[in-house]
Image (tube, rainbow, N blue to C red):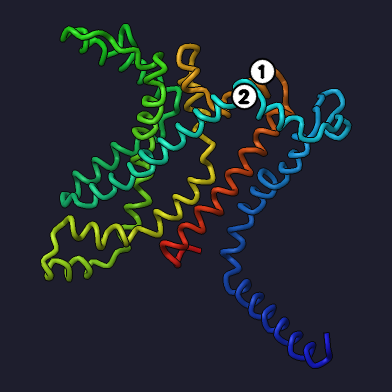
Amino acid sequence: MSSEASKVYLPAVRNTRSKLWKTVWKFRLLYLLLIPELIYFIIFKYVPMAGIIVAFKQYNLSLGFFDSPWIGFDNFKNFINGVYFRDILLNTILISLYKLVFGFSAPIVLALMLNEIRMVWFKRTVQTITYLPHFISWIIAYGLMVALFAPGSGLFNALLKQYGFDAIPFLTDPAWARTMIVASDIWKEAGWGAILYLAALVGIDPSLYEASRIDGANRWRQMWHITLPGIRNVIFILLILRMGSILDAGFDQIFIFVNSFNQEKADIIDTWVYRQGIERMQIGLATAVGVFKSVIGTVLVLLSNQLAKRFDGQIW
């Protein structure tokens, strides 16, 4: 670098650093509040990433983390060439896509419906009822599903029998497995997800609705041209975050729902990894599958982010 260039460059660097430190000092209390969160992510998110090395080893508990023999990409090859790879990958993608299409749109629809309610007490009551299932564990939720849809004693099947219809094995029939998984996920999480959209709806300028009413716009026109564009950024951001976990179909839910009868349609990558990594102690293979999912999730996040930028330049 020439002397003239350094004379221009160095003062600019000093000026940038000075502005940075002034900003940090100005918001020092907020940064202090951020420190515990940073420590949490460093300890529990970034430090464990060193364990990725296990994916390239024939991990042995007796030999330990560093002394286990290297096997390169053999764990990845064994997973991809495995007998169950196609089935569990297809189940994972289909269940994730169903949840993305129906489960992602359900909170938006619910928020729009709640936004149109003018009776405050009724709106708050419905909102409370819809987001309460979020706080129920999947074990309790599955118990409720058994009480409602069990082939022998379920309430719904009891009503079917009373009116002369045959009982439907909702929880054991493979044909109903994905439907029950997606429907129960919507029931449990739609109300909780709607909270974010309701918060975004509050930020829309009320004068826009007043101007549209003067121009003769009805409720549907207002929703299409004002409400939805007003929460578009929130929708895109949540969609990007959702795309990153497209291969996470919900281990805790499906682990409870899957059984020997519906396993062919409900078994996903995470439940397969649990059996291989925990029950059969193939830790290297389980780690390789985790890396496989992370790489695909990262690629999908980047692609969805670029797609969001095409629709709205304000997204990142």
Q: Of helix, strand and loop, which one carries label 2? A: helix
165 up-or-down from 77: above or below? above
Q: Residue furthest bottom?
A: 4
Tag 2: Cα neighbours inside 10 Å, few (<14), some, or many (≥20)?
Answer: some
The x and y percentages for residue 70 are 85, 33
User: Is residue 116 toward the left or the right of residue 272 in the image?
Assistant: left
Q: Which corner quadrant of the image does residue 143 belong to? A: top left
How far is disc 1 from disc 2 in space, using C-alphas? 7 Å
Picture residue at 18% right of the left edge, 49% below the top: 117
Task: Say whether marks 1 and 2 touch (CB < 8 Å).
Answer: yes
Q: Residue at x 39, y 53 (%)?
A: 235
Q: Nearer the viewer, residue 75 or 198?
A: 75
Nearest to the observer: residue 234 or residue 69: 69
Which x, y percent locates residue 240? 48, 51
Q: How crowded is the residue under tag 1: few (<14 C-alpha within 10 Å), some, or many (20+)?
A: few
Residue designated by label 2: 274
**What residue is shown at x 58% (from left), y 58% (from top)?**
33
> Tag on residue 148?
none
Image quadrant where one finds the N terminus: bottom right
Residue at mark 1: 279
Q: Secondary structure at mark 1?
A: helix
The amino acid beneath tag 1 is Glu
State the image coordinates of residue 163 (x, y, percent, origin top left): 16, 10
In the picture, measured across the screen, residue 147 lies left or right of residue 278, that is left
Which residue is rendered at x = 80% and y = 32% of the image?
A: 57
